[in-house]
Image (cartoon, rainbow, N blue to C red):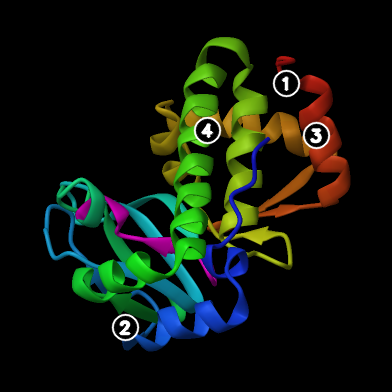
Amino acid sequence: MNETRPLLALLPKSLARALTASGQEKHYKNGQHIHTRGTDHQGLSIIMNGRVGFGIYGEDGGFIQTGVLGEGHCFGEATLFLNKPRPYDADALGKTTVVTVSKPQLDALLAREPALTQALLVTLTSRLYQALEFSDDTRTNTLEVRVAKVLLRLQQEGCFGDNVIRVRQVDLAFALGQSRVSVGKALTTLKTQGLLTLGYGEIHISDLSLFKRWIAQHQFAR
Protein backbone atom coordinates (compact mmCIF):
# COMPACT_ATOMS: atom_id res chain seq x y z
CA MET A 1 0.00 0.00 0.00
CA ASN A 2 1.35 3.42 -0.97
CA GLU A 3 1.94 5.80 1.93
CA THR A 4 1.67 9.54 1.35
CA ARG A 5 4.39 11.42 3.22
CA PRO A 6 3.56 14.87 4.62
CA LEU A 7 4.60 17.76 2.40
CA LEU A 8 6.73 19.37 5.13
CA ALA A 9 8.65 16.10 5.60
CA LEU A 10 9.63 16.18 1.92
CA LEU A 11 11.17 19.66 2.14
CA PRO A 12 14.55 20.82 3.46
CA LYS A 13 13.97 22.37 6.90
CA SER A 14 14.90 25.86 5.70
CA LEU A 15 12.39 25.67 2.83
CA ALA A 16 9.67 24.25 5.11
CA ARG A 17 10.20 27.24 7.43
CA ALA A 18 10.10 29.70 4.51
CA LEU A 19 6.89 28.14 3.19
CA THR A 20 5.01 28.24 6.49
CA ALA A 21 6.34 31.71 7.34
CA SER A 22 4.84 33.07 4.11
CA GLY A 23 1.32 32.03 5.11
CA GLN A 24 -1.34 33.10 7.55
CA GLU A 25 -1.68 31.03 10.72
CA LYS A 26 -5.03 30.22 12.29
CA HIS A 27 -5.94 28.17 15.35
CA TYR A 28 -9.04 25.99 15.55
CA LYS A 29 -10.87 24.32 18.41
CA ASN A 30 -12.08 20.74 18.26
CA GLY A 31 -14.95 20.47 15.77
CA GLN A 32 -14.49 24.00 14.45
CA HIS A 33 -15.26 24.43 10.75
CA ILE A 34 -12.22 25.23 8.58
CA HIS A 35 -13.73 25.54 5.13
CA THR A 36 -16.94 24.75 3.28
CA ARG A 37 -17.41 22.50 0.29
CA GLY A 38 -17.84 24.52 -2.92
CA THR A 39 -15.92 27.62 -1.83
CA ASP A 40 -13.26 28.81 -4.25
CA HIS A 41 -10.84 30.72 -2.02
CA GLN A 42 -7.38 29.92 -3.40
CA GLY A 43 -4.66 28.83 -1.02
CA LEU A 44 -2.44 25.96 0.05
CA SER A 45 -3.26 24.99 3.63
CA ILE A 46 -0.66 23.20 5.77
CA ILE A 47 -1.45 21.45 9.05
CA MET A 48 1.10 22.60 11.63
CA ASN A 49 -0.35 20.50 14.45
CA GLY A 50 -3.51 18.56 15.13
CA ARG A 51 -5.68 16.87 12.51
CA VAL A 52 -8.24 17.86 9.88
CA GLY A 53 -11.21 15.71 8.95
CA PHE A 54 -12.65 15.92 5.44
CA GLY A 55 -16.14 14.93 4.35
CA ILE A 56 -19.61 16.26 3.64
CA TYR A 57 -22.56 17.34 5.72
CA GLY A 58 -25.60 15.11 5.31
CA GLU A 59 -29.21 16.22 5.07
CA ASP A 60 -29.56 15.77 8.84
CA GLY A 61 -26.66 18.17 9.44
CA GLY A 62 -24.33 15.37 10.54
CA PHE A 63 -20.74 15.37 9.30
CA ILE A 64 -19.82 12.27 7.29
CA GLN A 65 -16.05 11.98 7.44
CA THR A 66 -14.22 10.41 4.49
CA GLY A 67 -10.60 11.26 5.25
CA VAL A 68 -8.17 12.59 7.82
CA LEU A 69 -4.86 14.41 7.42
CA GLY A 70 -2.37 15.07 10.19
CA GLU A 71 0.63 17.25 10.92
CA GLY A 72 2.72 18.32 7.93
CA HIS A 73 0.12 17.41 5.31
CA CYS A 74 -1.40 19.97 2.97
CA PHE A 75 -4.75 20.51 1.26
CA GLY A 76 -6.34 22.98 -1.15
CA GLU A 77 -4.27 22.10 -4.22
CA ALA A 78 -7.33 21.91 -6.50
CA THR A 79 -8.09 25.59 -5.89
CA LEU A 80 -4.57 26.52 -7.00
CA PHE A 81 -3.71 24.24 -9.90
CA LEU A 82 -7.14 23.44 -11.34
CA ASN A 83 -9.03 26.57 -10.31
CA LYS A 84 -11.70 24.27 -8.88
CA PRO A 85 -13.80 24.81 -5.75
CA ARG A 86 -13.06 22.81 -2.62
CA PRO A 87 -14.60 19.33 -2.95
CA TYR A 88 -15.08 18.67 0.78
CA ASP A 89 -15.99 20.33 4.02
CA ALA A 90 -13.12 20.41 6.52
CA ASP A 91 -13.34 20.40 10.33
CA ALA A 92 -10.67 20.43 13.03
CA LEU A 93 -10.25 17.20 14.98
CA GLY A 94 -8.94 18.39 18.31
CA LYS A 95 -6.94 21.59 18.72
CA THR A 96 -5.47 22.28 15.30
CA THR A 97 -3.26 24.94 13.74
CA VAL A 98 -3.34 25.55 9.99
CA VAL A 99 -1.17 27.88 7.92
CA THR A 100 -2.63 28.97 4.58
CA VAL A 101 -0.31 30.25 1.86
CA SER A 102 -1.98 32.48 -0.74
CA LYS A 103 -1.61 31.80 -4.46
CA PRO A 104 0.69 34.83 -5.08
CA GLN A 105 2.97 33.80 -2.20
CA LEU A 106 3.05 30.17 -3.35
CA ASP A 107 3.69 31.14 -6.99
CA ALA A 108 6.66 33.26 -5.89
CA LEU A 109 8.13 30.37 -3.89
CA LEU A 110 7.56 27.87 -6.70
CA ALA A 111 9.35 30.17 -9.14
CA ARG A 112 12.55 30.23 -7.09
CA GLU A 113 12.44 26.90 -5.21
CA PRO A 114 12.49 23.80 -7.47
CA ALA A 115 12.50 21.58 -4.37
CA LEU A 116 9.01 22.81 -3.48
CA THR A 117 7.74 21.95 -6.96
CA GLN A 118 9.28 18.49 -6.65
CA ALA A 119 7.74 17.90 -3.21
CA LEU A 120 4.27 18.95 -4.39
CA LEU A 121 4.58 16.63 -7.40
CA VAL A 122 5.47 13.74 -5.11
CA THR A 123 2.54 14.55 -2.81
CA LEU A 124 -0.01 14.85 -5.62
CA THR A 125 1.29 11.78 -7.49
CA SER A 126 1.07 9.73 -4.29
CA ARG A 127 -2.56 10.77 -3.84
CA LEU A 128 -3.32 9.93 -7.48
CA TYR A 129 -1.75 6.51 -6.98
CA GLN A 130 -3.91 6.00 -3.89
CA ALA A 131 -7.04 6.95 -5.81
CA LEU A 132 -6.22 4.48 -8.61
CA GLU A 133 -5.41 1.78 -6.05
CA PHE A 134 -8.71 2.43 -4.27
CA SER A 135 -10.60 2.10 -7.55
CA ASP A 136 -8.80 -1.14 -8.36
CA ASP A 137 -9.50 -2.50 -4.87
CA THR A 138 -13.25 -2.32 -5.47
CA ARG A 139 -12.85 -4.91 -8.23
CA THR A 140 -10.14 -7.15 -6.85
CA ASN A 141 -10.27 -7.23 -3.03
CA THR A 142 -12.73 -8.45 -0.43
CA LEU A 143 -14.53 -5.87 1.69
CA GLU A 144 -12.47 -6.96 4.73
CA VAL A 145 -9.24 -6.09 2.92
CA ARG A 146 -10.67 -2.81 1.65
CA VAL A 147 -11.79 -1.81 5.14
CA ALA A 148 -8.36 -2.71 6.53
CA LYS A 149 -6.58 -0.65 3.87
CA VAL A 150 -8.74 2.41 4.52
CA LEU A 151 -8.04 2.10 8.25
CA LEU A 152 -4.31 1.85 7.58
CA ARG A 153 -4.43 4.94 5.36
CA LEU A 154 -6.28 6.87 8.04
CA GLN A 155 -3.72 5.75 10.63
CA GLN A 156 -0.81 6.87 8.45
CA GLU A 157 -2.13 10.16 7.08
CA GLY A 158 -3.98 11.13 10.22
CA CYS A 159 -0.84 10.54 12.30
CA PHE A 160 -2.66 8.40 14.86
CA GLY A 161 0.48 7.37 16.69
CA ASP A 162 -1.41 5.42 19.34
CA ASN A 163 -3.08 3.28 16.63
CA VAL A 164 -6.50 4.43 17.83
CA ILE A 165 -8.30 5.69 14.73
CA ARG A 166 -11.11 8.05 15.59
CA VAL A 167 -13.67 7.29 12.92
CA ARG A 168 -17.29 6.14 12.96
CA GLN A 169 -18.52 3.08 11.12
CA VAL A 170 -20.95 5.24 9.15
CA ASP A 171 -17.98 7.29 7.89
CA LEU A 172 -16.17 4.14 6.77
CA ALA A 173 -19.30 2.93 5.01
CA PHE A 174 -19.68 6.22 3.13
CA ALA A 175 -15.98 6.28 2.15
CA LEU A 176 -16.21 2.72 0.81
CA GLY A 177 -19.59 3.11 -0.87
CA GLN A 178 -21.00 0.25 1.21
CA SER A 179 -23.83 -0.14 3.69
CA ARG A 180 -23.12 0.33 7.37
CA VAL A 181 -24.25 -3.26 7.98
CA SER A 182 -21.74 -4.66 5.46
CA VAL A 183 -18.88 -2.62 6.90
CA GLY A 184 -19.90 -3.65 10.42
CA LYS A 185 -19.69 -7.33 9.43
CA ALA A 186 -16.24 -6.77 7.87
CA LEU A 187 -15.01 -5.05 11.03
CA THR A 188 -16.35 -7.93 13.14
CA THR A 189 -14.40 -10.37 10.97
CA LEU A 190 -11.20 -8.38 11.48
CA LYS A 191 -11.91 -8.19 15.20
CA THR A 192 -12.45 -11.98 15.40
CA GLN A 193 -9.01 -12.47 13.85
CA GLY A 194 -7.45 -10.36 16.59
CA LEU A 195 -6.50 -7.51 14.29
CA LEU A 196 -8.50 -4.74 15.96
CA THR A 197 -10.91 -3.82 18.71
CA LEU A 198 -13.98 -1.61 18.33
CA GLY A 199 -14.98 1.30 20.54
CA TYR A 200 -17.48 4.14 20.43
CA GLY A 201 -16.42 6.33 17.52
CA GLU A 202 -12.98 4.74 17.34
CA ILE A 203 -11.15 1.64 16.15
CA HIS A 204 -7.97 0.35 17.76
CA ILE A 205 -5.43 -1.57 15.66
CA SER A 206 -4.08 -4.23 18.02
CA ASP A 207 -0.66 -4.65 16.37
CA LEU A 208 0.27 -2.37 13.48
CA SER A 209 2.98 -4.67 12.08
CA LEU A 210 0.63 -7.66 12.19
CA PHE A 211 -2.13 -5.54 10.58
CA LYS A 212 0.16 -4.59 7.68
CA ARG A 213 1.26 -8.22 7.18
CA TRP A 214 -2.37 -9.37 7.13
CA ILE A 215 -3.19 -6.86 4.39
CA ALA A 216 -0.12 -7.88 2.36
CA GLN A 217 -1.07 -11.56 2.63
CA HIS A 218 -4.75 -11.13 1.76
CA GLN A 219 -4.85 -8.35 -0.81
CA PHE A 220 -4.82 -9.03 -4.53
CA ALA A 221 -1.19 -9.19 -5.70
CA ARG A 222 -0.15 -6.40 -8.05
Find numbered disc 2 in the image and state the secondary structure of the residue it sits on: loop
Asked if residue 115 is positioned above or below residue 178 in the image, the reply reads below
Q: Which residue is mark 4?
A: 129
- The kind of residue on which mark 3 rests is Thr
Q: Which residue is mark 2?
A: 23
Find numbered disc 3 in the image and state the secondary structure of the residue it sits on: helix
Residues under labels 3 and 2: Cα distance? 47 Å
Residue 118 location in percent, x, y? 50, 54
Residues under labels 1 and 4: Cα distance? 16 Å
Nearer the N terminus, badge 1 or badge 2? 2
Nearer the N terminus, badge 4 or badge 3? 4
Q: Which residue is mark 3?
A: 192
Residue 15 location in percent, x, y? 51, 78
- The kind of residue on which mark 2 rests is Gly
Q: Which residue is mark 1?
A: 219
Residue stretch in magenta? 70-79
- The kind of residue on which mark 1 rests is Gln
Q: Is residue 161 left or right of residue 97?
A: right
Label 3 crowding class (10 Å Cα cut-off): few <14, some 14-19, many 20+? few
Q: Is residue 193 left or right of residue 14?
A: right
Q: Which mark is residue 119?
A: none
Residues under labels 4 and 2: Cα distance? 28 Å
Residues under labels 1 and 2: Cα distance? 41 Å
